[in-house]
Image (tube, rainbow, N blue to C red):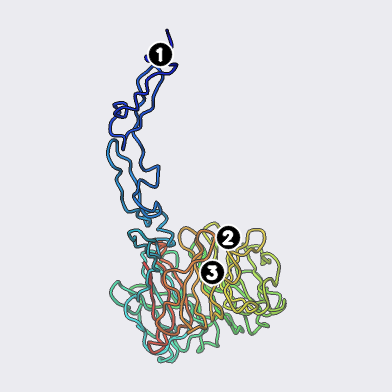
């Protein structure tokens, strides 16, 4: 009768019951009986059950093979997201068979000799040229506190021009490279009325004064800062102790230094004054003694100085203040928060001042802070803290602050810790500091 099985029953023959229905080795092939039709044969995916007996799927991969045992292989966890070890620029991942990977922070290494300067430097400052050459500037206490600049030539540190090129003692020295990589220094000039002098290095003629030595008349500058507008015009900022320690910013005109905006434009006395340029817009930040010794930031685009956000924000007594502006003109500040175990915080301004990551993210009891950006606008900080006074550097990545390689990497106590970045290689930060283990001379380290 149609529809009846060959044996008079109501169901067809189960071909799979004999010789796996001709599908092949039952270890590797499945046979599915079909009523009144040949069976359906399919390769068994052994990997779908217990990872094909390859072992823990956390550490082993299983690749199914048609009609054969699966291929088992150790899983290289480092191949994905650097094995969870952190960013591969500054952290290494070593794969282990049947075990989690070994994560290690990349070590910092000296650039040239440790303690390469002579004498006992003061006011360590650093910048990096567009070709990746690091420069340091300092006042040499063994040479009458005169100014000196050195650069790393790929093999050793060498003087840029004559060492001790200032006429006399230099204070608050800063080095900044112009947009065309010309080295400039600004400092308090003790043989010219303790006023500001700016010099630049012109190869091969040497260091030359920009404008007039010892400007402006009647001023007694503190916290001298230097930066450049995008057109190459140098600007200096300082707190003028001859005018109630209020802020003053000047720029180089055609032949002489001229005030940029009002003289003494801060609400009151200013401390820890810093300056940064964004195109032709000048930003200053300072500890505002007229507003509880809290932070005030002001800007001037050419029409006068005005506060950026509220005056006197943040905690009382912040110090180690630094300011930097990223490529789209957003100002950032870093500071040591005296109200929270002297840890570092970073804030940025976009309609209001907001924390970048967590507040007080560093080790406690920091002595200083330094702030810089890479070419992708990632902020970096460097500092030394009071636990052995060692140097550390951190960057803001994936929404959090992480150490760059090994933390507290200096071999001995460090002070005046500064960070600068190779603009063409964001993965190469340079950190300079006065190295107490090398005769209180300057050491620069980098990480790659």
Looking at the image, is mark 1 or mark 3 nearer the viewer?
1
Distance (Cα) linking label 1 and label 3: 111 Å
Instruction: Tell me the quadrant of the picture where the C terminus can be found.
Output: bottom left
First along the sequence among labels 1 and 3:
1
Marker count (numbered): 3
Distance (Cα) linking label 2 and label 1: 87 Å
Instruction: Name the residue rendered at 40%, 47% in the picture.
Output: 50
Q: Nearer the viewer, residue 33 or 318?
A: 33
Q: Is residue 443 left or right of residue 211?
A: left
Looking at the image, is mark 2 or mark 1 nearer the viewer?
1
Density class for disc 1 (Cα within 10 Å; few <14, some 14-19, many ≥20) is few
Measured as percent of width and height from the top left, residue 272 is found at 59, 78
Q: Which mark is residue 330?
A: 2
Instruction: Name the residue rendered at 38%, 75% in the picture.
Output: 445
Instruction: Tell me the quadrant of the picture where the N terminus can be found.
Output: top left
Density class for disc 2 (Cα within 10 Å; few <14, some 14-19, many ≥20) is few
**What residue sits right under mark 3 in the picture?**
253
Measured as percent of width and height from the top left, residue 204 is found at 33, 74
Q: Nearer the viewer, residue 166 or 322?
A: 322
Give the structural element (helix, strand or loop) at label 1. loop
First along the sequence among labels 2 and 1:
1
Does residue 371 appear anywhere in the picture? yes
Measured as percent of width and height from the top left, residue 301 is found at 62, 62
Q: Which mark is residue 8?
A: 1
């Amino acid at each position: 009768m149609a529809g009846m099985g060959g044996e008079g029953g109501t169901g067809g023959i189960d071909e799979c019951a004999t010789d796996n229905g001709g599908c092949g080795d039952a270890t590797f092939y499945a046979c599915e009986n079909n009523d009144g039709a040949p069976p359906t044969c399919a390769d068994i995916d052994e990997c779908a059950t217990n990872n094909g007996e390859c072992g823990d799927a956390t550490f082993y991969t299983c690749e199914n093979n048609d009609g054969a045992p699966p291929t088992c292989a150790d899983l290289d966890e480092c191949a994905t997201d650097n094995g969870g070890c952190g960013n591969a620029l500054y952290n290494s991942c070593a794969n282990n068979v049947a075990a989690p990977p070994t994560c290690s922070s990349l070590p910092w290494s000296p650039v040239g000799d440790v303690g390469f300067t002579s004498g006992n430097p003061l006011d360590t400052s650093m910048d990096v040229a567009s070709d990746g050459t690091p420069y340091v500037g300092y006042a040499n206490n063994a040479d009458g506190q005169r100014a000196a600049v050195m650069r790393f030539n790929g093999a050793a540190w060498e003087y840029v021009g004559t060492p001790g090129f200032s006429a006399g003692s230099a204070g608050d020295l800063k080095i900044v490279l112009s947009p065309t990589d010309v080295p400039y220094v600004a400092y308090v000039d003790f043989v010219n009325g303790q006023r500001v002098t700016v010099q630049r290095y012109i190869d091969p003629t040497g260091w030359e004064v920009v404008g007039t030595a010892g400007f402006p008349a009647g001023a007694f500058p503190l916290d001298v800062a230097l930066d450049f507008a995008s057109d190459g015009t140098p600007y200096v900022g300082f707190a003028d102790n001859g005018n109630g320690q209020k802020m003053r910013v000047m720029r180089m005109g055609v032949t002489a230094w001229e005030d940029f905006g009002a003289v003494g434009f801060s609400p009151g006395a200013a401390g820890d004054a810093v300056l940064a340029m964004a195109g032709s817009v000048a930003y200053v930040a300072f500890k505002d003694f007229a507003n509880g010794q809290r932070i005030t930031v002001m800007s001037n685009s050419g029409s006068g100085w005005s506060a950026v956000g509220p005056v006197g924000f943040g905690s009382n007594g912040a110090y180690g203040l630094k300011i930097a502006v990223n490529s789209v003109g957003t100002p950032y500040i870093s500071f040591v928060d005296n109200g929270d175990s002297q840890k570092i915080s970073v804030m940025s301004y976009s309609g209001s001042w907001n924390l970048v990551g967590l507040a007080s993210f560093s080790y406690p009891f920091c002595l200083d802070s330094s702030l810089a950006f890479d070419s992708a606008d990632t902020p970096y900080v460097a500092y030394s803290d009071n636990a052995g006074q060692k140097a550390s550097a951190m960057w803001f990545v994936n929404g959090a602050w992480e150490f760059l390689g090994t933390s507290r990497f200096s071999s001995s106590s460090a002070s005046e810790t500064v960070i600068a970045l190779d603009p063409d290689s964001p993965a190469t930060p340079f950190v300079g500091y006065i190295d107490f283990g090398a005769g209180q001379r300057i050491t620069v380290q980098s990480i790659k």
